[in-house]
Image: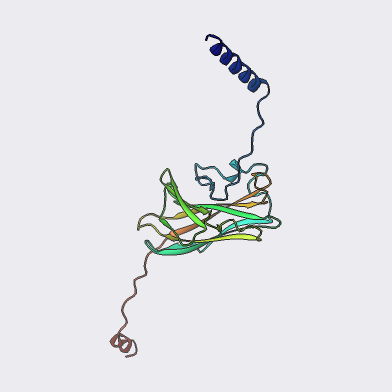
């Protein structure tokens, strides 16, 4: 009966020795078609997509880009704005993105994001909210084989007093080989100042007549 523990000890020692002198080669992480990890927008205190998609620097060339369309020059508190993020780069095959909106002054979350389709999803981490691509139930949020990827969603501005807001976006122009190598990462920021509703004095027929007396 004492032979079984002895045999197990020998087997365990052999396995540990093999791992020490001939460790298995690391496997590349799989591509995140269903949505990237949170906090990869290059916002203050965050990482960026190259943390996983290695091999290239951020914004490697002028052939590709990520854009944020619809950001107002100045926002009205509580007003909702439709935004669009687009990623493109000649020669690439799949697309992904992540965006967050933060108060410029203290880098805390600014406003709320509303999902308007099935190819984007939301996530929250450390008080910040993110929107990113996803691929679920047959909806391809990576636009496989197309020349670019484009995602729409809504952003509702924060209450009065939040001040300027900065949007941070990172885009992945992937080569479609199901690995994290050969993908090109681009970043973009856009800013919006806090505005206020313009007071408009009521115009009456009596006031118009006063102007021409």
Place residue 48 in its image quadrant. top right
170 with respect to 22 (left or right) = left
As drawn, which residue projects farthest toward the front?
A: 1
Residue 99's place in the image compared with 206, above or below, is above
Q: Position of residue 84 (x, y in %)?
A: 53, 62
In-front residue for pair 48/73:
48
In-front residue for pair 132/60:
132
Q: Residue at x 53, y 50 (%)?
A: 35
Residue 44's place in the image compared with 114, above or below, is above
94 with respect to 157 (left or right) = right
Figure quadrant of the C terminus = bottom left
Q: Position of residue 97 (x, y in %)?
A: 56, 53
- Numbered-mark total: 0
Q: Residue at x 52, y 56 (%)?
A: 137
Q: Position of residue 140 (x, y in %)?
A: 57, 58
Q: Residue at x 56, y 57 (%)?
A: 141
Place residue 202 in its image quadrant. bottom left
Residue 173's place in the image compared with 80, above or below, is above
As drawn, which residue projects farthest toward the right?
A: 91
Examine the rendering and report whether any part of residue 189 can be seen: yes
197 with respect to 137 (left or right) = left
């Amino acid at each position: 009966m004492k032979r079984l523990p002895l045999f197990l000890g020998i087997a365990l020692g052999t396995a540990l020795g093999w791992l020490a002198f001939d460790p298995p080669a690391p496997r590349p992480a799989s591509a995140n078609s269903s949505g990237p990890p949170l906090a990869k927008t290059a916002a203050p205190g965050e990482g960026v997509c190259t943390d996983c998609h290695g091999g290239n620097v951020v914004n490697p060339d002028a052939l590709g880009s990520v854009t944020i369309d619809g950001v107002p020059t100045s926002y009205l508190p509580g007003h909702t704005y439709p935004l669009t993020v687009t990623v493109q780069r000649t020669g690439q095959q799949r697309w992904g993105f992540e965006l967050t909106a933060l108060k410029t002054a203290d880098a805390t979350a600014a406003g709320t994001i509303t999902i308007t389709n099935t190819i984007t999803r939301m996530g929250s981490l450390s008080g910040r909210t993110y929107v990113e691509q996803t691929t679920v139930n047959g909806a391809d949020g990576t636009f496989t084989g197309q020349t670019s990827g484009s995602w729409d969603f809504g952003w509702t501005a924060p209450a009065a007093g939040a001040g300027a807001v900065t949007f941070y976006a990172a885009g992945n122009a992937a080569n479609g080989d199901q690995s994290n190598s050969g993908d090109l990462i681009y970043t973009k920021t856009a800013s919006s100042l806090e505005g206020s509703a313009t007071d408009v004095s009521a115009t009456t027929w009596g006031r118009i007549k006063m102007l021409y007396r």
